[in-house]
Image (cartoon, rainbow, N blue to C red):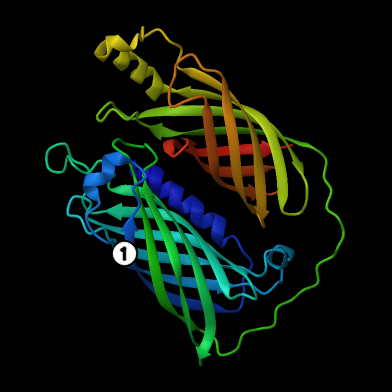
Amino acid sequence: MKQLVTYTFLFCCAFIFAQEKQTTSTFDVNYFKGNIALHNDDILHLINGHPEGFILSWNKKTFGHQAWEQRYNYPDYGVSFAYQNLKNEVLGNNYSLYAHYNFYFFKRNLMLRIGQGLAYTTNPYDKVDNHKNIAFGSRLLSSTYLMLNYKKERLFDRFGFQTGLSLIHYSNANVKAPNTSVNSITFNVGLTYNLEEETPEYIYNLSEEKFTEPIKFNFALRSGINESDVVGSGQYPFLVVSAYADKRLSHKSAVQLGADVFFSQFLEELIYYKSVAFPEDNVSGDEDWKRVGVFAGHELFINKLSVVTQLGYYVYYPYDFEGRTYFRVGMKRYFGDKIFGALTLKSHGAKAEAVELGVGIRL
């Protein structure tokens, strides 16, 4: 478990910091306070306060030295550290470290930050000492945060101001049960500080030439460990074999169509458990635990990084587990023109099944 989440975070950092050296950086600090969203009735007993904390961030600015920076309106990239008091002794406190991007709109007055990383929680589930914490089944969690801020830099000398809303999500993606997860919706206010006295000029020299590329074929292997929702049922490895075609529509965008074959050992164990423990469910124990799905997807390219979203449907589905529709969202990092690594989350609606670490080739 520890090795998996450590590799996950290192993978995220490699995505973000594989950039050319730039010239200007900033710090910002934000205080936030808000509420835990009731996305699952099972966590109602955990919501009894208004979580608060702070986010401290370092940002590296871009100015258009590469074409992708101009296409995305000169984003920032950086790292964030967050502390959150969840205002519940059962949940404890969370400490998080993220890699993030800042994207700008409306004359750079509106900033959207997307951060992905790891969190450490001080009081996870324990069947003896903390059985009420069904949100976090492990000390190490994956975490995502979104921040939408009105931002004004250099209001006074190097200092600026920002305020807005943040969504902070903690989950271990069913690496270990239980895992109902927690989402915090907060209001934040903060200060920014520029490390340099002057801001360089933004470069704009993009060509209007249309981007074209033939259909490409992709093959990927994804793996990891996960556990069913039955606490203590055990963590098991899984393997996903994927093949799909993609067509680039522009410098930024591509569409995908393909198929997945899933070999999920936790499902084999779950079928056996159901057949023994719940005979009224009419599970024989001989059901096939393999699944086959077809999917359509989209890929958004940001330099050597891309963001993948896919919607799938099981065409071979011998055992009913969370419904026939599945989703996949995550990141890919290209190493050259053909080889890529991937970090994705597979889910059924809001219910996570697994974090997938993958490698693939695009031909």
Of all residues shown, which one is farthest toward the left?
128
Q: Is residue 337 visible?
A: no
Q: Decide: is 221 above or below 129.
A: above
Q: Position of residue 279 (x, y in %)?
A: 28, 9
What residue is drawn where x is 55% and y is 72%?
60
Say left or right for 59 vs 281.
right
Give above or below for 362 relative to 238.
Answer: below
Between 110 and 240, the one nearer to me in the picture: 110
The residue beneath circle 1 is 83
Direction from residue 98 to residue 308 in the image, left or right:
right
Determine the residue positioned at 29% across, 65% down.
52
Q: Amino acid at mark 1?
A: Tyr
Q: Residues within 10 Å of mark 1 (few under 14, many from 20)?
A: some
Quadrant containing the C terminus in the rendered view: top right
Left or right position of 314 against 45:
right
**Residue at figure coordinates x 32%, y 48% from the top left:** 140
Q: What secondary structure is found at the residue carrying circle 1?
A: strand
- Residue extending farthest to the right is 209
Is residue 230 visible in this depiction of the protein?
Answer: yes
Instruction: Give x and y (percent) for residue 65.
Output: 71, 71
Q: Position of residue 266 (x, y in %)?
A: 38, 24
| Residue located at (62% from left, 37% from top) | 360
